[in-house]
């Protein structure tokens, strides 16, 4: 399967929009146009990003948003941001903590009696759900999981296709996660699990009496002016101008999964946004304008993501850091079928920021394009942080690559 097959006969375009540049002369920015073009050339049909650096904003884009029409990738297109959703859910839960309606160190059984049954429900705290130390298995593991359980979502390409139109309820997702063998005792170790955030969305609904979607919108999206950011609420289609979503298929052609039922993820990964909105969210969050200082400190209190290398990465409450030579870079990554997101931000929230959006993933195991894509992505990340020190081993430590699930 070569790049021409992946891209069909679509012709790519590339460009960088410079946003908010001062009138006075300023140092030239990195060659972001060339770097996103490299990602496109490596095998991603369409790429776009938003970068803030040194008081300037850049919006590079390359390739096509839609292979069928040839519509170009461009700044501001919506896409599914996957696990980035967790930062928004965590902020919503922390709002409830600030209102003293939720206690981080109380068991989940206090808020969702009987949902996590028995001793595990009594020993698993809200904090453990938020920082992925609950030991509850991820209901959305893939076939790359060593267990090789064909019942799990996305175990095969056929299951990717079947899940596109399948409707799950939150209790069904929780039952799937709890039905798998626990990955550890509550609080013992870090293990990424979408089931944790399904439980947190259920908690939000139980405590507030309103839908998870309504609470995230009311408490986060609207107050922060994230006007391009939405939750699907059961809709399969993406709203407004957006990137299509592709998975390379067994016949060598990319399969379009733009319409997808995100009920498989719900509070774990169903947010729709743009790189600009994601950057704004993290800028305001890390700048102390979203949560009181004490709650932001709680959010940024982390556990090691890889026990053997605690100096490289830590996970807080819906947010993580990766080590850089000039300090920690905070943010999250995300994967939905056909859409990948990488979002990293300097600890001050504004000196360096980037969110990168790609519209193809789930490449076949052993596909040579994967190495080329990873190399191009790492080069992009390094250029963004040029002069501040490229984050150490950044590509290796994104959670979606640390864990077994959701790797290309």
Image (cartoon, rainbow, N blue to C red):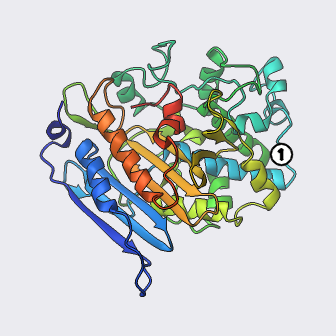
Q: Residue 271 vs residue 87: left or right?
A: left
The answer to which image quadrant residue 132 occupies is top right
Q: Residue 298 vs residue 75: left or right?
A: right
Residue 373 coordinates in the image, percent (x, y):
32, 40
Whether residue 209 can be seen here: no
Q: How many marks?
A: 1
Residue 54 coordinates in the image, percent (x, y):
50, 71
Dot 1, crowdedness within 10 Å: few (<14), some or many (≥20)?
many
Q: Residue 48 vs residue 119: left or right?
A: left
The residue tagged 1 is 102
Relative to 149, say whether 206 is above or below: below
Q: Residue at 61% x, 40% y: name it.
A: 313
Relative to 159, say whether 31 is above or below: below
- Depth order, front residue of 216/58: 58
Residue 146 coordinates in the image, percent (x, y):
50, 14
Relative to 188, say whether 347 is above or below: below
């Amino acid at each position: 399967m070569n790049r021409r097959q992946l891209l069909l006969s679509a012709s790519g375009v590339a460009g960088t929009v410079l946003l908010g540049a001062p009138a006075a002369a300023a140092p030239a920015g990195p060659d972001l146009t060339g770097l996103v073009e490299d990602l496109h050339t490596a095998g991603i049909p369409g790429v776009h990003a938003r970068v803030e650096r040194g008081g300037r904003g850049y919006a590079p884009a390359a390739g096509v948003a839609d292979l069928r029409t040839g519509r170009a990738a461009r700044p501001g297109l919506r896409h599914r941001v996957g696990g980035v959703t967790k930062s928004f859910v965590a902020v919503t839960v922390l709002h409830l903590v600030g209102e003293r309606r939720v206690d981080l160190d109380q068991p989940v059984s206090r808020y969702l009696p009987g949902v996590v049954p028995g001793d595990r429900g009594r020993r698993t705290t809200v904090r453990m759900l938020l920082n992925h130390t609950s030991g509850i298995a991820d209901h959305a593991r893939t076939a790359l999981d060593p267990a090789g359980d064909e019942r799990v979502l996305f175990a095969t390409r056929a299951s990717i296709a079947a899940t596109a139109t399948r409707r799950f309820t939150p209790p069904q997702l929780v039952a799937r996660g709890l039905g798998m063998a626990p990955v550890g005792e509550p609080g013992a170790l870090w293990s990424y699990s979408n089931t944790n955030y399904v439980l947190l969305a259920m908690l939000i609904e139980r405590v507030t009496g309103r839908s998870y979607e309504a609470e995230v919108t009311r408490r986060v999206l609207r107050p922060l002016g994230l006007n391009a950011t939405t939750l699907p609420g059961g809709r399969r289609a993406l709203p407004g101008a957006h990137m299509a979503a592709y998975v390379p298929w067994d016949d060598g052609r990319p399969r379009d999964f733009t319409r997808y039922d995100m009920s498989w993820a719900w509070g774990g990964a169903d947010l729709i946004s743009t790189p600009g909105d994601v950057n704004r969210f993290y800028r305001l969050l890390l700048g102390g304008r979203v949560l009181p200082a004490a709650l932001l400190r709680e959010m940024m209190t982390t556990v090691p993501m890889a026990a053997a290398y605690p100096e490289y990465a830590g996970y807080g409450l819906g947010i993580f850091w990766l080590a850089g030579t000039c300090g920690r870079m905070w943010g999250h990554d995300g994967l939905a079928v056909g859409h990948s997101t990488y979002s990293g931000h300097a600890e001050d929230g504004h000196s360096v920021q980037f969110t990168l959006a790609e519209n193809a993933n789930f490449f076949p195991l052993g596909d040579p394009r994967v190495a080329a894509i990873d190399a191009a992505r790492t080069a992009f990340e390094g250029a963004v942080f040029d002069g501040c020190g490229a984050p150490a081993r950044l590509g290796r430590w994104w959670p979606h690559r640390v864990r077994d699930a959701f790797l290309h």
